[in-house]
Image: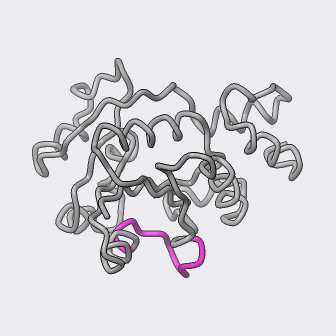
Amino acid sequence: MFVGLFGGTFDPIHNGHIEAANSAHLILKLDKVIMVPAGDPYLKRTKLVASPKERYRMVSLAVRKIPSLEVSDIEIFRPGPSYTIDTVRELKREGHEVIVLLGMDSIIEMDEWQDPDLLHSECEVVGLTRPGFQIDKSKSYLSRQRKYSLRTIEVNSPEISSTRVRNLIQDGVDVADLIPQEVNEYIKEQKLYH
């Protein structure tokens, strides 16, 4: 099966994530996109608010009615830091052909990852960019693109960040237009980010 691996903290998942995953599914002609909440995102530990299980639950709620998307707990129950390379290898052992889907911010930060060169040797990494995003202004991105012949696709994704969603919730602002309805209800029930 030809799958896109779309990992992240998803703290919380928002409509931008969903739109990006759907666009990548169509543009790259993937069989499916697997959303993988990081169990222990070692570069963002200090910024996390929701627990791994809460983040997994939110992604599950967000994708359950979208046939092209699914969620995996592959990193939630794996001990230690969540490394994308480990997840790619596990999916390949299960017989999948894997493309890693990364937002531009993640590609720019890849030099801080655990052995990013190894990831590029295991699978293709595709950068997801929003309409109007000027990738040619990022030296980190251009350097990585030259080194690995990185492919970039433009996805139909609104400009939303999980940080912004959390801040709005803390300020008592309704975020119903930024996150899936089921996720919004779960956040309210669990009193997350309040």
State the residue at coordinates (34%, 23%): 133
Give the extent of the magenta segment: 76-86
Image quadrant in which you'd find residue 112: bottom left
Residue 79, compared with residue 160, is above or below; it is: below
Residue 29, compared with residue 37, is above or below; it is: above
Most foreground residue, 164 or 28:
28
Q: Is residue 40 left or right of residue 88?
A: right
Within the magenta stretch, is there residue 79? Answer: yes
Q: Specify the farthest residue to the top.
A: 132
Within the magenta stretch, is there residue 83? Answer: yes
Q: Is residue 154 left or right of residue 187?
A: left
Quarter containing the C terminus: top right
Q: Position of residue 36 (x, y in %)?
A: 51, 60
State the residue at coordinates (50%, 73%): 81
Q: Position of residue 82 (x, y in %)?
A: 48, 69
State the residue at coordinates (62%, 47%): 65
State the residue at coordinates (50%, 56%): 35
Image quadrant in which you'd find residue 138: top left
Most foreground residue, 1 or 109:
1
Q: Position of residue 125 (x, y in %)?
A: 26, 52
Report the predominant secondary structure element of the magenta stretch: loop
Q: How is the image coloured?
A: one colour
Most foreground residue, 128 or 109:
128
Q: Is residue 136 left or right of residue 35?
A: left
Q: Position of residue 41 (x, y in %)?
A: 53, 62
Whether residue 40 is visible to the viewer of this picture, yes or no, is: no
Image quadrant in which you'd find residue 105: top left
Quarter containing the N terminus: bottom left
Whether residue 28 is visible to the viewer of this picture, yes or no, is: yes
